[in-house]
Amino acid sequence: MNTSRPAFWVSPVLCAAVLVAGVYAGVSGLGDTRLPWLVGGLLLLVAVDVFEFRRYPVRTPRLVAAGLLAVRTALYVGLAFVDGSGLARLLLLLVPFTAYFAFGLRVAVGLAVVCLAVAVVSTPDWYAHLEQTSDLVMFVVGLVLTLTMAAVAVRERDGRIRLQESQRTIAELSAAAERARVARDLHDDLGHHLTAIVVQLEKASAFHDRSPDTSKEAVLDASRSARRALTEVRESVRSLRSFSLPSALEELAAGDVTLTVSGAPDPFGTGALHALYRAAQEGITNARRHASATHISVALALDTERAVLTVTDDGRGMGAAAEGFGLLGMRERVALAGGRVDLASTPAGTVLTVTIPGPA
């Protein structure tokens, strides 16, 4: 953003107004207007504005801004002396206005005092004429309004800059969170499958000569693990493109899983819905592959206050085994969504409960 040229349209508009008033005064004989000097000075002002706009489209260096401000001020003063209508003195209002953006409040106030002094000097015996006194009072009011408007514009500009910085920070944090989520998903979807494939292939290599049947079965197990990994990767990609939690759970529960869904997922964000899906996936995977469960049920209850996912199985439970990376990743994902994970495991089965509060 250009700090010394906050509003490019302000100067051309005032120059046009001064030109119209000066031409009218010169044609009507109202005052001593030197039209060639007036037109030439206004053209120089426009040329300075165009130069700055083209040369420094983003930000004018402070030293250059100071030089351009000095040139403009000299032109403003000169135009005030060649304009018989007296309107050119309004151009002096641009001095503190421009300086506020480039150099701050103190410099702008100091230049406003200087502009007022120039206006007083250029109006001799003003105190003896009511009209001239009124003009000076209005000039003071214009300086106050100019500084006020510049202050408001500076606050708006700074607020916009802070908003842009906040948006960049949010984007960076979102990218970091997305990278962490992708890492967890890669583990959940591929980690244990790839481990199983490696183990089975090593087993096949070890039993290749001693037990060909065992080696063949290990290769078949590795092939099945690879197919399952491919299926889950496809499901992950499909869920990222167009994610519907009830539909995703129906695909996940196909076969030996009883699914019950109540309520609508609309109030919940994508992060919370993905966390619920991954929790159901992890619970079903553990029940199928590690607990030797014969019956698995998944219940999802959604309302405006909370979402509760329950995965129940009749397997042999976890026993004294420590939680693996899958459960740890699930707890982390749910925690990021503001929820909690409760796990109750006995030799008669396991109950996994995930609770995520609503947006309110």
Image (cartoon, rainbow, N blue to C red):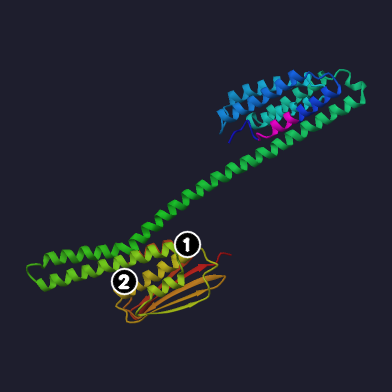
**Label 2, on which residue?**
320
Going by the numbered disc 1, the residue's amino acid type is Gly
Mark 1 nearby-residue class (10 Å; few <14, some 14–19, many ≥20):
some
**Label 1, on which residue?**
271
Residue at the image position 74 percent from the left and 33 percent from the top: 146
Residue at the image position 47 percent from the left and 66 percent from the top: 273
Question: Image height check: is 143 above or below 274?
Answer: above
Q: Which mark is residue 24?
A: none
Q: Position of residue 234 (x, y in %)?
A: 35, 65
Q: Is residue 274 visible?
A: yes
> Which quarter of the picture shows residue 200?
bottom left
Q: Residue furthest front?
A: 27
- Which secondary structure type mostly characterizes the magenta part of the structure? helix
Please tell me which residue lies in front, 3 or 294.
Answer: 3
- Quick one: quadrant of the C terminus? bottom right
Is residue 288 found left or right of 248 in the rendered image?
A: left
Q: Position of residue 307 (x, y in %)?
A: 51, 71
Question: Which of disc 2 and disc 1 is earlier in sequence?
Answer: 1
Q: Which residues are magenta?
A: 7-16
Helix, strand, or loop for circle 1? helix
Residue at the image position 51 percent from the left and 46 percent from the top: 168
